[in-house]
Image (cartoon, helix red, strand yellow):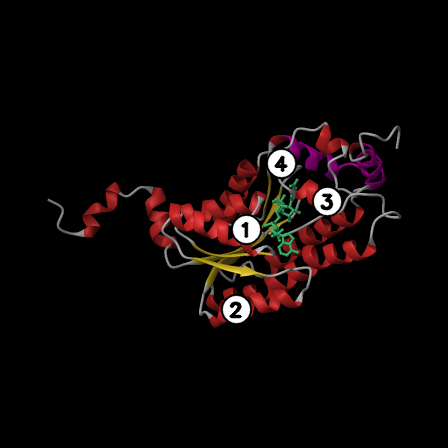
Amino acid sequence: MISDVSQLAPFITARQKQYMKANNHYAVVTGGTSGIGYELVKLLARDGYNLVIVARHEADLIHVANEIKQQYSVEVVIIAKDLFDVNNAFEIHNEVSTKNIDVEILINDAGQGQYGEFVETDIRRELDIITLNISSLVALTKLFLVDMVRRGSGKIMNLSSIASKTPGPWQSVYHGTKAFVQSFTEAIRSEVKDSGVTITALLPGATATDFFDKAEMLDSKIVREGKLDDAARVAKDGYEALMKGDDMVVSGIKNKLQVAMSNVTPDATLADKMKKQQAPVSSESK
Ligand SMILES: NC(=O)c1ccc[n+]([C@@H]2O[C@H](COP(=O)([O-])OP(=O)(O)OC[C@H]3O[C@@H](n4cnc5c(N)ncnc54)[C@H](OP(=O)(O)O)[C@@H]3O)[C@@H](O)[C@H]2O)c1
């Protein structure tokens, strides 16, 4: 008969060990109600992480929180904030700190793009996207990273993109924001290397989520004619890299090849190629 819990050790699976380790730890996920962020939320909950989920729409947050709490025995805190306003990044950190939640994992997933040629697109929307994809991500990273470095442990994952590796006609501002995210993530990773905190960049290719609808991009060749990746698969690649503390992961073989080609191709050539790939299906020879 087993009289001591330690005698159970040989029968505990790796998943159960991870669950026991994660219990009482919190992960903050921005954009956790949809697409890649939602899939990451499920992976974290499966492994026993309590969650703080951030997005704009409260009804979606409540829906996801109820689903997660029913399926996994973890706590879920929801914060409805619009990260188009950088002040909300500070409010999120403040709210989490006030609740005495020690954040072990931060995933900066919330991000948007806008489709169209730069001379045609709405500059106000593009400035909002720069705030969301860059300013709010930088603010949240700073605020939570300082706590993590002080504590000597933590993990951060920033949603970059294979778009970070190429100039992107038809999505010029979006590609620019992701180039920033990639460069920024690699730089601070090097700075905190010996601190006990790891920082990972996840680089998906075009993935089947609501992203393209929000970006008014449904008529783009890349969406209409390309094969979009599965969000759950992308999240799994990212989650594994995050847990290992890898510097970056490009999700999928096709995307790995594309990034390898980008690294040895002149930017002007890449831009012209991307201009064709991202053009509207309706356009002739743009
Ligand atoms: N899908 C792709 O092809 C692809 C490829 C490479 C990288 N990525 C990156 O992956 C990340 C997730 O995108 P996704 O494809 O999963 O998109 P998605 O399905 O549209 O999900 C976006 C999530 O972010 C939240 N969000 C959007 N704007 C926000 C704001 N202003 N403030 C707070 N939360 C906001 C959304 O909730 P609310 O709308 O309720 O706010 C939602 O939870 C983004 O950073 C994106 O750039 C996507």
User: Residue 60 shows which numbered tag?
Assistant: 1
Label 4, ligand 1: CB separation under 8 Å: yes
- Mark 1 CB in 8 Å range of ligand 1? yes
Residue type of the residue flagged with mark 1: Asp
**Marks 1 and 3, how far apart at CA:** 19 Å
Q: Give the mark nearest the N terminus, 2 or 1.
A: 1
Mark 4: secondary structure: loop
Q: Please identify the quadrant where the C terminus is shown.
A: top right
Alpha carbon distance from label 3 to label 2: 30 Å
Residue 150 position within the rendered picture, expressed as x and y whole percent measured from the top left: 50, 69
The quarter holding residue 261 reads: top right
Main SS of the magenta part reads helix
The answer to whether 1 is drawn above or below residue 88 in the figure is above
Q: Secondary structure at mark 1?
A: helix
Residue 241 visible in this rendered orientation of the protein: no
Relative depth, front residue between 212 and 18: 212
Residue range (magenta):
254-276
Amino acid type of the residue that numbered disc 3 sits on in the rendered structure: Ala
Which residue is labeled 2 in the image? 95
Label 2 element class: helix
Q: Amino acid at mark 2?
A: Glu
